[in-house]
Image (tube, rainbow, N blue to C red):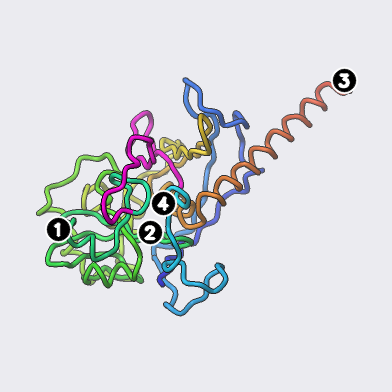
């Protein structure tokens, strides 16, 4: 199956300043800011279908997929405005026929089932364990346009899925969409664009640009002036979250997709390890400031 690869490098967590190592949600908002430095790769590469993954050699797409188990709940903010949200709320858990996990707009369906649900201009997100999500734009007549292996191509939805389950992703971003006709036109006009002529780093950025028309989804679409107006709030559990800050939406999407690729358990473990290390460092600093203090032992 296809496994989209996004190359990125970022600062080691230990090198990044933190404000509150507990990461607990409070009324005044998220407390931890992290800056990331990404490579300039603008491609979305896929390995051959016979590649072996780190899952005992089995094909991830053939394994049971539960969105609530594998996917990371998160919200994206531009300053104080929420522009993206993925949440498995309790009132959204009732499954329809053919659903798998989540219920509502986060339910996943087989490619054949999706064909009965899609309308021209819809965005579709294909998901699979241990793989980057793959986004496409449905243009009608069972066809989609998407960024695939360094080229914008037109293909059948079932072919683009590569066997993965998918969902209609219109409700994830909260921007006002363009009309369906304009979305389809935006997508079709880019067919054949490839290599260094591409203006998008991955399939999600391309599909979102087609639907919302915002330059923020394009490579270099925003000036980097030192400020970090974007925040990715990752939910670790009840009343507990961790927040990362970014200079651009493009960079934030890269990290969000990396989290989707490694999976919920790995993200929680990664961030929990960081939070624990930060707490230990704070304790050591406190000890240095008060060298004469003694700890009571019961």
Q: Residue furthest front?
A: 97
Earlier residue among tags 4 and 1: 4
Q: Quadrant of residue 74?
A: top left
Nearer to me, 226 or 215 = 215
Q: CA distance from mark 1 to mark 2?
A: 22 Å
In the figure, is residue 132 to the left or right of 107? right
Residue closer to the observer: 56 or 133: 56
Mark linked to residue 127 = 2
Disc 2, disc 4: CB below 8 Å? yes
Q: Mark 1 highlights which residue?
A: 184
Which quadrant of the structure image shows residue 87? top left
The residue nearer to you, when weighing 294 against 59, is 59
Instruction: Tell whether position 96 is magenta.
Output: yes
Disc 3: which residue: 296
Q: Earlier in the sequence, mark 1 or mark 2?
A: 2
**Does residue 12 show up magenta in the picture?**
no
Q: Which residue is mark 4?
A: 67
For marks 3 and 2 on the same chain, the one whose residue lies earlier in the sequence: 2
> Which residues, given as a range, are shown in magenta?
72-99
Residue at 32% from the left image edge and 50% from the top image edge? 107
Q: CA distance from mark 4 to mark 1?
A: 28 Å
Pointers 4 and 3 in contact (CB under 8 A)? no
Classed neighbour count for the residue bearing mark 2: other residues with Cα under 10 Å, few (<14), some (14–19), many (≥20): many
Circle 4: element type: helix
How far apart are the alpha carbons under marks 3 and 1? Answer: 68 Å
The mark lying in front, picked from 2 and 4, is 4
């Amino acid at each position: 199956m296809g496994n989209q690869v996004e190359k990125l490098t970022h600062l080691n967590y230990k090198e990044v300043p933190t404000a509150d190592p507990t990461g607990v949600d409070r009324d005044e908002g998220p407390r931890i800011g992290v800056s990331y430095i990404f490579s300039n790769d603008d491609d979305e590469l896929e390995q051959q279908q016979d590649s072996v993954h780190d899952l005992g050699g089995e094909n991830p797409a053939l394994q049971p997929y539960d969105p609530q188990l594998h996917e990371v709940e998160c919200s994206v903010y531009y300053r104080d405005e929420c522009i993206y949200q993925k949440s498995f709320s309790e009132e959204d858990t009732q499954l329809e026929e053919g659903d798998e996990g989540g219920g509502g707009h986060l339910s996943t369906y087989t490619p054949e089932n999706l064909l009965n649900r899609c309308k021209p201009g819809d965005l579709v997100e294909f998901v699979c364990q241990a793989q980057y999500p793959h986004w496409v734009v449905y243009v009608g007549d069972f066809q989609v346009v998407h960024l695939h292996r360094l080229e914008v191509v037109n293909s059948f939805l079932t072919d683009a899925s590569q066997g993965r389950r998918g969902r209609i992703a219109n409700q994830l971003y909260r921007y006002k969409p363009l009309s369906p006709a304009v979305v389809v036109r935006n997508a079709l006009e880019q067919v054949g664009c490839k290599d260094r002529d591409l203006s998008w780093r991955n399939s999600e950025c391309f599909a979102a640009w087609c639907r919302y028309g915002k330059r923020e989804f394009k490579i270099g679409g925003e000036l980097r002036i030192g400020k970090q107006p974007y925040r990715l709030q990752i939910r670790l559990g009840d009343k507990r979250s961790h927040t990362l800050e970014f200079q651009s939406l493009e960079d934030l999407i890269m990290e969000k997709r990396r989290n989707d690729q490694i999976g919920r358990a790995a993200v929680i473990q990664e961030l929990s390890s960081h939070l624990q290390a930060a707490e230990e460092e704070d304790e050591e600093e406190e000890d240095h400031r008060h060298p004469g203090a003694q700890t009571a032992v019961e």
